[in-house]
Image: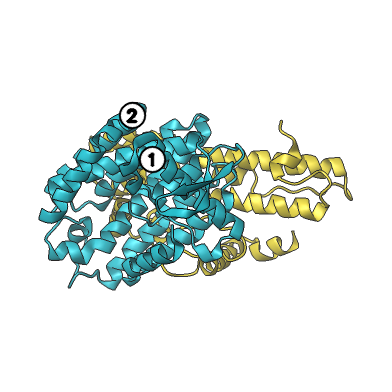
Chain colours: A yellow, B cyan
Amino acid sequence: MNDPYSVLGVSPSASDEEVKKAYRDLARKYHPDNYHDNPLADLASEKMKEINEAYDTITKSREHGGGSSYSYGGGAYQSAGQSRSASGSAQYVRIRNLINANDLAQAEAMLNAIGNHDAEWYYLMGSVYWRRGWMDQAGQYYRTAATMDPSNPEYRNAVQYMNQGGQAYRPAGGMGMDMTGGDAACNMCQNLICADCCCEAMGGNLIPCIGCR
Amino acid sequence: MYGYVRPVKGELKVSEFERFQGVYCGLCHELARKFGFFSRFLVNYDFTFLAMLLAGDEPVAMCPRRCPAHPVRKRACLESCQSLSLAADMTVVLGWWKLADGAKDGKFPASVGCRLACLALKRAYDRAAARQPQFAAAVEENLAALQTLEREKCANLDAAADKFASILRSISGCVADPARQRAAGELLYHLGRIIYILDAADDLAEDIKTNSYNPLRYRFQPVNGRLSPEDEKLLRTGLQHSHNALVSAYALMGENAYGGILSNTIYLGLPAATQAVFAGTWNASAKIHRKRSNL
């Protein structure tokens, strides 16, 4: 394994606070939410693992007050947003697996071979386009899927994610511009508040967790 | 070439600005050295960005040089290196094909100019294409496919943007490390998409006036050369998603000596260019920028 300090980009003489800060910034950078259905999600998750391990190694070696090391995300979280819930016909399950494995050509060929285009078909075609980087097409297919089956939360979420503009890492301090003419930092707060509400609905609380870390 | 890919100068550190200028001047000198005087006119911001993006972690060596644009005081120029050499090859290949395109499809006086420039640069092109055969093949193939889409008045914005994006992505073939190559490919693909779509948005009114192909004419229903607010929002949200993908890929590229300039260009420069294009002030601001920077 690489030197944990160089993984976090700090010197071995850095204070605990500095190590924590470096770790937090990197964890924010490679957070799975920034790689939502992204073809590079596997690389980011490797990076995240490396950072978590480096941070754990450092905190353990420094043995501060019972070693209350924590890691951002965690195994279960890293695959969130990537693996699709497998509903529908066996054919669609296979296509979903192909999309998750980034075999877009094969997934598209299988979709094109299906004559009956239901809501799930449009959703999966949208996913293929999304992964390929064809954002405009992806949006059109997601919207068709959600119109055909308005009660399906998966399709609704995809449309919402599309309309809201997604998210990606921005370095702290004045680099918060986005392409829609708004302020990315502002959108991030909105997302955070949104995520907090979801968390709270499930019995958790996101904003104080970040505060106390 | 297009010039949308540039840092916001006011937000660069002085040392970063000097380094950026050094790469731009270095690329110009590299073009002259390898491909002769005329190829100098092809120097542009997009490939300056590329030279910095593809640079490994070797130290940056600058040396003072004179040139026809700065005959009296010498300017610090990046010394010839692998990424500069690569960027020069690609500048000539893509620049030549774009001129060839202009000679074939352009309107009367401009098309003659393009033809002459093509002739003047033919030998340079042959040499550059021989050095980068895969890139030259990708450019030729994708530009031909784009012309077919243009003739068909393609309304699929993604399909049209895909051709230019694929040209840029093919550049990632020169990155040795497989993970870094994947990240570079994704980054360049979305960069190509953003450049293509911004260019289409910038030229929309003009293209409608001259009845030229523009994907936005067929994808949306522009009125008086402008998109409706809803369509513009949809288009810009799509650009935002591409920008997110670009940023996420950039995070996986690893650091080099140009990190500050690259981050500025990606996080600030691209959104600023987008803002200016949609506000209709891009052409004016680009002119002022050229005048002030003396680049």
Q: Amino acid at mark 1?
A: Ala
Image spot of residue A91 (x, y percent)? 33, 35
- Give the mark, 1 or 2, whose residue is nearer the N terminus: 1
User: Compared to B186, does B131 lie above or below?
Assistant: above
Q: Amino acid at mark 2?
A: Gln
Q: Which residue is mark 2?
A: B134
Q: Chain of mark 1?
A: B
Looking at the rendered structure, the secondary structure element under dot 1 is helix
Label 2 crowd bin: few (<14), some (14–19), many (20+), radius 10 Å: some
**In the image, what residue occupies the spot 67% across and 49% down?**
A72
Image spot of residue A9 (x, y percent)? 71, 45
Q: Quadrant of residue B119?
A: top left
Along the horizontal axis of the image, is B151 left or right of B274? Answer: left
Q: Quadrant of the C terminus of chain B?
A: bottom left
Looking at the rendered structure, the secondary structure element under dot 2 is helix
Numbered mark located on residue B32 in the image? 1
Label 1 crowd bin: few (<14), some (14–19), many (20+), radius 10 Å: some
Q: Are marks 1 and 2 on the same chain?
A: yes
Kindly indicate whether the residue at mark 2 contacts the one at mark 1 (C-beta within 8 angstroms): no
